[in-house]
Image (cartoon, grey):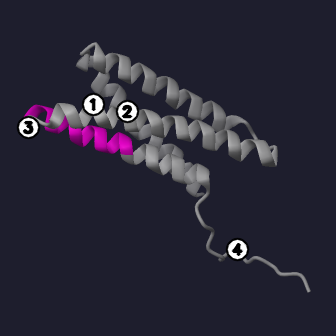
Amino acid sequence: MATQVTANAKRSPSFLQIAIALQTLTIFLQAVSAGLVLTSSYGETLHSVGARVMYGASMLYVLAAVLAWKPGGGSPRPIWHASGFLVLASVQVVLGIAHVPSVHLPLGVLMFGLSVLALARRQR
C-alpha cells in the first residue's frame, strides 16, 4: 500500500521560505529602527546592529537558495535572486555608512518590497 499525499496536506515551510521570511522581517525592523534614529538616543545603535543582522539574513538567504537548488537539481533562479539581494544589502550598507539618505532610504523600501514579493512567490 502506497501512501498518498493529498493536495490539502499542510506543508511545513522550507529552509528557503524561512530564510526569505527572516530577511523580510529584518528589513522591516530596519525601517522601524530608522525611525528611532530620528527620535531617540539609542536609535542609531539599534539601526547599526540591525544592519548587521539584516546582512547576515541576506547571506543566509543565499545559502538556503544554494541548498534548495543543489539536492534537487532545480532551477538556479532563486540563487540569482538571493545573490541580487546580497548585492543590494551591500550597497545599502555602504550608503548607510556614507550617510547618503537620499538613496539609502528608497533602496530600503525597494528591498522590503522585493523581499515581500519573493516571500509571496515562495508561498504558492
Q: Which mark is residue 40?
A: 3
User: If the image is split into quadrants, where does the N terminus sit?
Assistant: bottom right
Q: Which residues are magenta?
A: 26-39
Question: What amino acid does circle 3 point to?
Answer: Ser
Magenta-drawn stretch, dominant element (helix, strand or loop): helix
Using the rendered view, name the quadrant where residue 96 is placed: top left
Residue 16: where, in percent of width, then height?
Answer: 60, 49
N-term mark: 3 or 2 = 3
Image position of 68 (left or right of 88): right
Distance between the Cα atoms at labels 1 and 4?
Answer: 44 Å
Q: Earlier in the sequence, mark 4 or mark 2?
A: 4
Image position of 29 with respect to 59: above or below: below
Judge whether residue 46 is colored magenta: no
The residue tagged 4 is 7
Q: Amino acid at mark 2?
A: Arg
- Mark 1–mark 3 Cα distance, whole angstroms, equals 14 Å
How many angstroms separate mark 4 from mark 2 (CA)?
A: 40 Å
Residue 31: in magenta span: yes
Query: How far, Cα to Cα, is label 3 from label 2?
Result: 20 Å
Which sits in the foreground, 53 or 121?
53
Residue count near mark 3 (Cα–Cα under 10 Å), binned few <14, some 14–19, many ≥20: few
Residue 48 is tagged as 1
Q: Is 81 left or right of 53, judged from the image as shown?
A: right
Q: Residue at x 36, y 26 (%)?
A: 107
Which disc, if any, is residue 52?
2
Residue 74 appears anywhere in the view: no
Mark 4: give few (<14), some (14-19) or many (20+) Cα within 10 Å.
Answer: few
